[in-house]
Image (tube, rainbow, N blue to C red):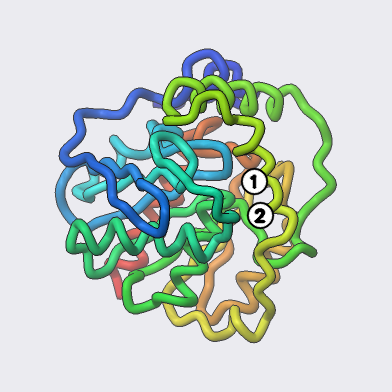
Amino acid sequence: MDFRDDELKNFEANGALPLPDVTDEGFVENDGASIHYSAYGAGAPVILIHGGLGHGGNWGYQVPALVDAGYCALLIDSRGHGRSTRDSKSYSYELMASDVLAVMDRLSIAKAALIGWSDGACTSMVLGIKASHRVTGVFFFGCNMDPSGTKEVQPSLALDRCFSRHVKDYAELSATPDQFEDFLAAVGKMMKTEPNYGAAELAKITVPVTVVQSEHDEFIKQEHAEYLARTIPGAEFLLLRGVSHFAPLQRPDQFNQAVQQFLDRLSAQ
């Protein structure tokens, strides 16, 4: 399948590929929020953490590939996103990392590989720093670890289409469908003020990391991704050609191949 949606027209109209039949699904209470999870397939656990304003269903093109490869794909809706709830507490990546650990504890998952996209990548890296004993490795796609890594965002039709899809999905999935503006402001505040990890903290990461950057990323500077790969011990750098911040949706085969290479790397260790 060489499916392409470079301009995100299909994503705006239909969302990602519908998820397969669920193996396990539920909610976990943690620190004022009810966190939704869903699992697919059996085998070694791979946790996929979506980007800001999205939800686990945005991984629709990745889940079947992981299941077919013999993994259990675990999707987690970040607090306030998708079907997960939130309280009035301010967002932080460390708080969302604690939500992931709460789901892992409920499901008796001792360690897992983490596939993070944008905000989900930062949450994954926080776990790599703060809870390395629970992480087999981090696939870090499209995210910064300090404010210097971000670009001045230029308006585009693709960004408009993605945002339009997020608005529709929030109205359909959220327990508070009329609070999107408050949700947007809360997530935006976190994005403007976090993360702030320096070279000394990054140098302490002991789990395998692959830093993945898209050639046309709208938000993240390539030199920042390269800096992360140089600073994190043993990290690898991978550039995805022809795609942007939305590579998992634009060219799933290319993205899935990169994920499989990362998982093969973990298996070989």
Residue type, label 2: Met
Q: Position of residue 42 (x, y in %)?
A: 15, 48
Mark number for residue 190? 2
Q: CA distance from mark 1 to mark 2?
A: 7 Å
Q: Is residue 201 visible?
A: yes
The residue positioned 38% from the left and 32% from the top of the image is: 60
- Could you say which quadrant of the image residue 36 lies in? top left
Nearer the observer, 93 or 162: 93
Per the image, label 2 sits on a secondary structure element best described as helix
Q: Position of residue 153 (x, y in %)?
A: 81, 41
- Could you say which quadrant of the image residue 195 lies in? bottom right
Q: Is residue 264 visible?
A: no
In the displayed structure, 144 sits above or below 188; it is: below
Residue type, label 1: Ala
Q: Give the side of residue 145 with respect to residue 264, left or right.
A: right
Mark number for residue 161? none
Per the image, label 1 sits on a secondary structure element best described as helix
Crowding at label 2, few (<14), some or many (≥20) Cα neighbours within 10 Å? some
Residue that carries the numbered disc 1 in the rendered image: 186
Work out which residue is located at the far top of the displayed protein and give it. 13
The residue positioned 60% from the left and 82% from the top of the image is: 201
Nearer the observer, 135 or 233: 135
Q: Give the side of residue 193 with respect to residue 141, left or right.
A: right
The residue positioned 24% from the left and 64% from the top of the image is: 105
Q: Position of residue 265 (x, y in %)?
A: 36, 66
Nearer the observer, 111 or 186: 186
Quarter holding the C terminus? bottom left
- Could you say which quadrant of the image residue 109 lies in? bottom left
Q: Position of residue 67 (x, y in %)?
A: 23, 42
